[in-house]
Image (spheres, rainbow, N blue to C red):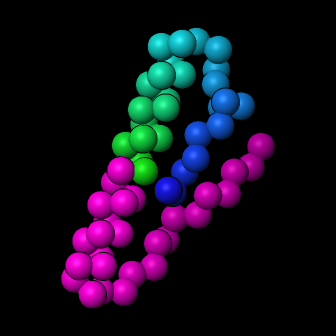
Amino acid sequence: MFFEWDDAYNMGVDVIDHQHRRIVDYINTLYQAIGRSIRQSGARMRCPLSMSWSN
């Protein structure tokens, strides 16, 4: 899993919170698919993304 949802991310608007959780699910699905593709091809790849958040 690339990004784990936490209830602290909720905005308090059910429709928006649901959409945000779906986006996180899509990101994680894409991350898993990329990982499978890399493993199947035998390629080596470094993920350029970092999960650093600042206020």
Q: Judge whether 19 appears above or below 34 on screen.
A: above
Question: In this image, 28 relative to 43: left or right?
Answer: right
Quadrant in the rendering for residue 46: bottom left
| Residue 7, position as x, y percentages in the image | 67, 30
The outermost residue toward the right is 55
Q: Judge whether 33 appears above or below 19 on screen.
A: below
Number of numbered discs on residues: 0
Q: Judge whether 5 appears above or below 48 on screen.
A: above
Q: Residue 49 lies in magenta, yes or no? A: yes
Quadrant in the rendering for residue 43: bottom left
Question: In this image, 24 relative to 45: left or right?
Answer: right
Q: Quadrant of the C terminus?
A: top right
Instruction: Tell me the residue at 54%/12% (across/down).
Output: 14
Of residue 4 and residue 9, the one placed in the foreground of this image is 4
Instruction: Tell me the residue at 36%/60% (across/down).
Output: 32
Instruction: Tell me the residue at 30%/77% (across/down).
Output: 38
Instruction: Tell me the residue at 54%/22% (across/down).
Output: 17
Q: Judge whether 46 appears above or below 33 on screen.
A: below
The outermost residue toward the left is 41
Which stretch did the figure color magenta? Answer: 29-55
| Residue 26, position as x, y percentages in the image | 37, 43
Question: In this image, 35 relative to 8: left or right?
Answer: left
Q: Residue 10 lies in magenta, yes or no? A: no
